[in-house]
Amino acid sequence: MSELAPTERTTLKRLPQRGAFDRETMYGILDEGFVCHVGFVVEGQPFIIPTAYGRAGDELFIHGSRASRMLKALRGGIQVCVTVTLVDGLVLARSAFHHSMNYRSVVVFGNARVVESDEEKLSALRSFTEHVAPARWQEVRPPNRQELNSTLVLALPLKEASAKLRTGPPVDDKEDYALPVWAGVVPLTLEAGEAIPDPRLPAGTPLSASLEGFNVASRPHSNTR
């Protein structure tokens, strides 16, 4: 994968050694996350909206109802900033000042375009579904004409972006290392829990193969609400 050239907006001003511009690092973070935050300004009012996303190739996709204020604003070609953050651990130092977090994040700038053709829209919607559960698309009913018409999909090119990461133990002031205070990292992970069947699921319906990647068990089926 190629490396993106830093721009004025993506150049890290503070702790530049934590920055990364290679697509492999950035795409790995994007593919692991589930929620992005979309920042934009309309008539002087800033908005930051959390939403699901998908990635296919060198584009990030967001979607929703055609009535969505965010999507209607972005389809006009205004500047947008999208961020994704993964928290890997709590960094506990010997001093309050040096407490931190281990994290991986990506910031993307650009202008979104409307996905017009049915073929590309279906491909984008598949990327959303496969992002949540790989191979899920082939198990479920695809969108029908009404659903396609009521859904707006926007594509943001991954051309101006950067990643920032922190790893490792706390970094304390030299004189603080002698303090009798525990210091280190508390790892944090996102784990899938036991699958809970829909109350209206017919008894005996097996767990979908697409969930095998999550290594989840299926809770005993119950028709009670």
Image: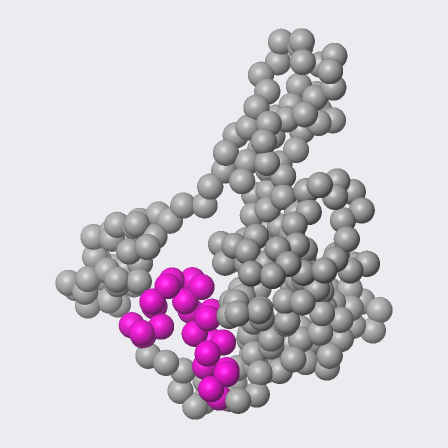
Q: Position of residue 200 (x, y in %)?
A: 26, 67
Compared to residue 156, the image places residue 190 above or below, namely above
Residue placed farthest to the right in the image?
A: 44
Q: Quadrant of the C terminus?
A: bottom left
Please name the predominant secondary structure of the magenta segment in the image: helix
Q: Quadrant of the N terminus?
A: bottom right
| Whether residue 200 is visible | yes
Residue placed farthest to the front in the image?
A: 2
Q: Residue at x 65, y 80 (%)?
A: 113
Q: Is residue 192 left or right of residue 182?
A: left
Q: Position of residue 76 (x, y in %)?
A: 72, 82
Using the image as rendered, state which of residue 207 and residue 25 is in the foreground: 25
Q: Residue at x 28, y 56 (%)?
A: 212
Residue placed farthest to the left in the image?
A: 204
The stretch drawn in magenta includes residue 137: yes
Q: Position of residue 196 (x, y in %)?
A: 30, 55
Compared to residue 2, the image places residue 177 above or below, namely above
Q: Is residue 199 left or right of residue 93?
A: left
Q: Position of residue 74 (x, y in %)?
A: 69, 76
Using the image as rendered, state which of residue 36 and residue 147 is in the foreground: 36
Using the image as rendered, state which of residue 80 and residue 29 is in the foreground: 29
Using the image as rendered, state which of residue 174 and residue 183 is in the foreground: 174
Q: Residue at x 40, y 82 (%)?
A: 143
- Find residue 46 and report its image quarter: bottom right
| Whether residue 50 is visible | no
Q: Is residue 114 left or right of residue 57?
A: right
Compared to residue 207, the image places residue 171 above or below, namely above
Q: Residue at x 43, y 74 (%)?
A: 126
* Magenta segment boundaries in residue numbering: 118-140
